[in-house]
Amino acid sequence: MVRVTINDQTLDVEAGSTVLQAAQRLGIDIPTFCYMKRLPPLASCRMCLIEIEGQRKLQPSCATAVTDGMVVRTNTPLIDETRSSMLDMLLANHPLDCPICDKGGECELQNQVMAYGPRESRFRDAKRVFHSEDIRLSPVVIMNVNRCIQCQRCVRMCEEVVGAVALGTVEKGMDTAVTGFEGSLASCDQCGNCIEVCPVGALMSFPYRYKARPWDLAETDTICPHCGTGCQLTVGTRKGEFMRVRSKWDQGVNRETLCVRGRFGLDFVTSPERIRRPMVRRDGALVAVSWEEAGDHLKRRLSAVEGKAAGGLASPRLPNETLYQFQKMMRTVFRTNNMDCSSRWSTPLDPLAALVTGHYTRAPLADVIGNDCVLVIGGNPTEENPVTEYLLRDAARRRQTGLFMLSARPSRLDADARAVVRVSPGGEGPGLAGVVAGLMAAADPNLLVAVPGNLGGSPAAIGDEASRLVRALLNAQSVTLLVSAELLRSPTARETLQQLSNLVQLVRLLGKRLAMQFFFDRANQLGAWDMGVLPATLPGLRPVADDQTHATLERSWGTEIPSEPGADFDGMLGLCDKGQMGALYIAGSDPLGSYPDRAYVKQALRAAGLLIVQDAFLTETVGMAEVVLPAASYGEETGTFTNNEGRLQKVCKFHEPVGEARGNLAIFDFVAALRGHSLRPSFQREIFDEIARLVPAYEGLNWDGLGADGAFTKGELAPPAGGFFAPAPASAPSDRLMLVTGNCLFHNGYLSERSEILNTVADDPYVEMGAQDAEELDLSDGDQLVVRSAQGELTAKLKVNRRFPKNLVFVPENYSALRLNSLMQRGEYPCPVEVRKARVADGTAAAIVLAPDPEDNAQGSGGRL
């Protein structure tokens, strides 16, 4: 520790701390422009100058390290005069158009001039003008370069945090201007972080422009619904109308940064595709009715299917309280454990529950990625969890964390990784088995006496990059595994999770400190698992057969609950297809648009005795329902999400439900009453209290204690009972093109597709493949392609990615018009495909799309009621 005295106040700080950081701890204000906490100091704006005893010149406090015994002054006459002069120089060329500038009322230059600036300018020359009109750099970013004060925050944020390198500077001196390549941001992430950090009105949000002023806005702090990172959002509304999203620099895992979906993708709450009234099917078409009529119809139909199986599917985008009440309703009202919380992948419960309850690290991401070695397994964090990617890049560049990647699909983080283990599509399991083999071959045998001799297979199978990873794991004192939930897509998900468990246990045996977290692409996937929306586990991921938990829940709920494991969503579809499913209840999910093998899903849903869909939006699954119950959307009810870190955060209401839509909890009460049951408690706060009492990981938490950064749930970390598993089968290399899917940067599910702003950024679906494959097939970037599988075909534009390995084809799952799931077959993933250029007629590419379904007419008519 070193001691510093600032304005006669003395403080001990860690060696290496800057004077600015020490002053902030003392509550002493030092003005800055170019400084940002998460960026390296630039010291270009000269606003933070200070006097240091014994030094002749003023020094920038943001870049001056404290030395022991240092004495500092921050408010001398010389400093005041210097700050005033710096502001006078900035104002010499700054347009004084505050009344029309979108930054008016929250402009840092405006604030600094009021606090430290001259009362009158000494400059009388004409102001410099770069452009007479604002420049539209992208669909969401517009620039007035005349207002720029050259702080370089936007350029550094884009390059050092986001990793996009879309902004830069041209010319020198007073003629320096910030711009995009050739005056556009066509290749950038469109995240808007440059807008957020701009201290003046140089970079502005085009969708928000001229809509409101800061003092007009009612602002609500909440959590982003688009992925599991759990970013803090501040949503601004004006007279109840959605206006904009920003984020606070000192709150949340994201600390001000957002991705394009979080900043610009919340306007889906005003989508015209909202369901406004209940609907029932009459004469083959959905007809709008009152809630009373819907209740009468539903009561009759539930009585008609009594005695048959029931099942439920709930979206992991719903709050914890809603998910908890859903599983409670299914178990107590419908008397079934047939339930699931995802229709896009399998959920192999044995290894998954062991990993989550035995090894999941519920701690800040910033802490777990500070370990010596961080291994990202599967998926593409750049597009699935963009803000998590920012933090990983920061750890690799500034904290010298050893970053390693093991995946089939490349990501932008590869450039910051010390080794990239590229596996074949779906080959993450064999890839992990190879790493385990390498560790066993290189580790001290005395540490591995508990490990089966055949566990790792042959270490000769791993390549140079995997060998580098193995050496890093052996040399590290602390290891973090970050696992993409995309691994669960494959039919071999169980084997892959078993290999992950082998690696986890082996790392622990080698004496390393271990942290493990998942990357989820749904906002509350971990919460859905914790709440027990699974066929074989109760709340807390405890087995259905756990007698003690079973008895505790029955006492609390006042009724018996089924004791046998139920069917997952695939099993429920099988029951439907066999005519054994009486009532299938779907809340907030669209399996017809997401589950592999669309034809099978349609056939199964059609065969269900009664299909009830509770949703906020018109989806393809809604179009097949017999009863449709309009629910509140995100932002229209209060609750909590559990993010990837295990952090419990408040999701707050900022918008009123549309039409006759009701809150999800109120709808569950409505349905339960039709069957003569009463769900108690039924209000959000009371349900939260019950969760905190009955779910071990949430024990002791209280609503009022959830501050701006939420509160962490507790990991039990019970040793897994299964122990080590057998080695994974060897990867079967294929010389065919293999299709994988997942999220793209601009969309991740049907919520984002209903954002008008996101659709202006990226409304065109695409097919992504490597340059070598494109060259062999005589394809060029931008060509219209036909992608064909044994199940069907689709057409989209080609996007050539030079970092893609051979035989890998990627199509994002989030463009419903493509009907991508029509290409896929149950139990087969990745999907073998053929690719060719679309036929050309009259100079334009032929549009080859799947024929529309007759049932779609019902959905279309329902949307206009």
Image: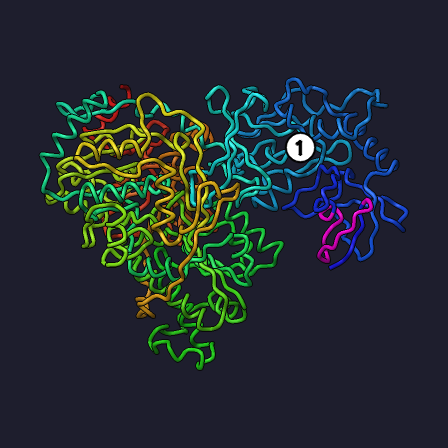
Q: Amino acid at mark 1?
A: Pro
Residue at 46% across / 66% down in the picture? 466
Q: Is residue 159 magenta-colored?
A: no
**In the figure, 248 relative to 698: above or below?**
above
Q: Position of residue 595 (x, y in %)?
A: 27, 43
Q: Position of residue 529 (x, y in %)?
A: 33, 50
Residue at 88% across / 37% down in the picture? 78
Residue 9 appears left or right of 550:
right
Quadrant occupied by the C terminus: top left
Query: Looking at the image, can residue 735 be seen?
Result: yes
Picture quadrant where residue 395 is located:
bottom right
Query: Looking at the image, can residue 804 be seen?
Result: no
Q: Position of residue 150 (x, y in %)?
A: 71, 35
Quadrant occupied by the N terminus: bottom right
Q: Nearer the viewer, residue 531 or 227?
A: 531
Residue that protrudes farthest toward the top in the picture? 99
Q: Identify the residue position indicated by label 1 in the image.
A: 199
Residue 293 appears left or right of 86:
left
Q: How many marks?
A: 1
Picture quadrant where residue 854 is located:
top left
Q: Nearer the viewer, residue 591 or 796?
A: 591
Residue 53 appears left or right of 772:
right
**Badge 1 local density, few (<14 within 10 Å), some, or many (20+)?**
many
Q: Secondary structure at mark 1?
A: loop
Q: Position of residue 286 (x, y in %)?
A: 20, 24
Q: Nearer the viewer, residue 779 or 464?
A: 464
Residue 703 appears left or right of 672:
right
Q: Looking at the image, what colour scheme do you see? A: rainbow
Residue at 22% across / 58% down in the picture? 545
| Magenta residue span | 7-22
Q: Is residue 16 magenta-colored?
A: yes
**In the figure, 382 relative to 628: above or below?**
below
